[in-house]
Each structure stands twice: as C-alpha cells, then as structure tokens.
Amino acid sequence: TELNLFELGFSIGGVEVERVSKTLATDTETLEVLLPYLDSGTHSLRIQWLRGQPKASLKINTIELQSLEGDDSDSDGIDDWQELRMAVDSDLDETTISTRVSPYCLEGTAGYLPELVISGHKLGDIAAVITPPTAYKSFSNKYYADVSLFADDATVINVEMHGGLTQFSKQVTWSSTNIVDQSEDILLRANDSLLLEAVPAGSNPTDPATISVYEAGSSSLVAESIQTVNDRFAFQFTGEHQSQTVTSYRVEASVGGQSYQFYVNVAQVDLGLPPSTVLGFQREWTPASLPSEVELETSPMVKLAESYPVENPRTFTLSVGGTGPQAIVARIDSDQDGI
C-alpha cells in the first residue's frame, strides 16, 4: 500500500545526490545508499522524506557510514567497482574543436558538482591561465560552464573530478569570422564575443581594414577598429542597448575600397523565477523573455507543450511526472549550441 511506500532524498552539502523509493515489507528494514566520491573532510548529510502520506510514519533508528572493499584487478590502488562508478558518473567529449564564439559552452557529466574542478591555459603558454568558470547543473548529472577562449592560440581546458582521479582535457580554438565571406546573420547569446576580421581574397597585407559595429537600423556607432590584414578584432555583443527579446547589430568592414556587412542578433533570454507545479496537474507557463529562435530542453520528467499558434510572449503547458530537482534550459541554434 502507499502507507508502506517511502521516497527519500539524500543530500550532501545541500546538493541532492540520490533519491530512493522503498516499499517496506516489515516494520524495520535496512536501506543502503551509495554516496559520491567525497574529498577528505567534514560533510553534512540531509535525509528528506518526500511525498509522505497521511497516517504514515517514519523513524530512522541509526545511520552508519561504511567503507566498501573490492577487487583491484589492475593493481592501481582503486577498487574496480569504484573505477566503474567514477566512469559512469563522469565524462567529457575530448575531441579538438574550433568555434567562432567565446566563451565556449563546455558540457559534461559529473555525479557530484561541488567536486568538479575546471581549469585551463593557452596551448603555447601554460603560464597564461583562464579564469576558472562556474559550472551549472542542467539535467540529471549533466553540467555546463562558459569558458573564455584565448584569441591568439588554442585554449586547453582541463576537467578534474574525484579528487583528481578522473581527468579530462579538451582543446578549443577560437576561429575568426571573416566579414568579407559572412553573408548570413549570426545568432548569439548576450555577452558572447566574435573574433572579427576582413580579409578579401588576394588582398595586400598592407591594406588596412576598418571594422565598425552599429546598432541595427541606425547610424549609432557601438565600436570601431582599424586593423591590418593579419589583425583580428574581438568584440563582445552585450545586447544591452535595446529592450527587445532580440537585439540586432550591423557589422561593417571597409578594405581595399570595398565594403562588406552582415548582422548579429543577440537573444535576450530570461526564464524568470523557477516555475512550480503540482504533481499530476498541468499549468500554463510564460517565460519572461524567450525569442522564437531559442529552443527549450527539459529533464525527462518535465513535459512542455508550446501553445499554437506561437505568440509573443511564448506560452507553454507545463507538467511534471515525478518529484525531485528538475531543469529547463534555453539553447540557441549556433555552431556551439550555447546554453
């Protein structure tokens, strides 16, 4: 019966690490929960009784912390079961890539986010290090973090978990956007940057290029830079000068007596306060600011259906199929799929 069904949430340092549903066949039973890898030190454990039924009661008699032992087939000092668990709850695509947008939206898996360490440096200069980015939880054990890239060399991103026992490395190159060849609009997140250049085919290396950024639809100059052919202009598109859901810029270049231009659209996304709903019921949800070019992704238990025809502001029917932390993230369609 539902009186014998108990759902418990286990949190370490305020972060939920496990959720267990248990049907008790007798008055007293033992429940075992495997905690994530934790660094040496003091950690707070919270056990939360979820979805308690009327007339049901629960008493925790004892809590014991146990150390499990197992085989170590490769004699590396780490039990095989621990290596398997660490491999399951951590991953990162280590392929070398290039992107024209900085910061780079790094995505991976981490079983326990507080022990995740992200660092990095310039490929040709390990003394030139990045500012460690903040990692945010998305779905299940997934995370994302914005990593600022070096303009003059590739950026090496290092990710450590499990006290350094699990390590990943990824190399990302910030590629330039040649205004001469760019004809299509580019969609960015607020505060994304492009590395701009103007290099016509067969251009004279001594020809200067004037790169200008304007508010779209006006002559209001936002920034201007005079470059040689070998120079590149890093510009951050904040989108702060307009209040619309999409802010537009016109990027122009003048070089060798020719003019070129394209447009950059900056998506202003604000999902507002986290929506709440009752399990098993639907509700209407309208994000504060969500351009039509932006897609929403959700945890498996969250169901979203957009109202049709699509209007501004966009409105969704929201329902949740289970308890526990859920997530809704906005993602733009770009060469880096930034969150």
Image (cartoon, rainbow, N blue to C red):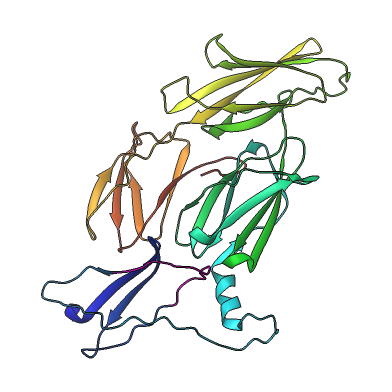
Image quarter of residue 319: bottom left
Is residue 89 located in the magenta-colored stretch of the structure? Answer: no
Report the span colored magenta. Answer: 34-47
Total marks placed? 0
- The furthest residue to the bottom: 26
- Looking at this view, is 77 or 159 the one in front? 77
Q: Is residue 214 above or below residue 19?
A: above
Residue 101 location in percent, x, y? 63, 37
Answer with left or right where residue 266 lies relative to residue 194.
left
Residue 175 location in percent, x, y? 72, 37
Q: Is residue 51 above or below residue 132?
A: below
Q: Is residue 244 above or below residue 3?
A: above
- The furthest residue to the front: 41
The residue at the point 61 percent across, 82 percent down is: 80
| Any part of residue 296 in sight | yes
Residue 67 location in percent, x, y? 49, 83
| Any part of residue 92 in sight | no
- Quadrant, the N terminus: bottom left
Image quarter of residue 116: bottom right
The residue at the point 16 percent across, 77 percent down is: 57
Answer with left or right where residue 323 lies relative to residue 262.
left
Q: Main secondary structure of the magenta part?
A: loop
Is residue 38 located in the magenta-colored stretch of the structure? Answer: yes
Answer with left or right where residue 62 lies relative to residue 218.
left
Answer with left or right where residue 330 lies relative to residue 302.
right
Residue 56 location in percent, x, y? 15, 77
The residue at the point 22 percent across, 56 percent down is: 278
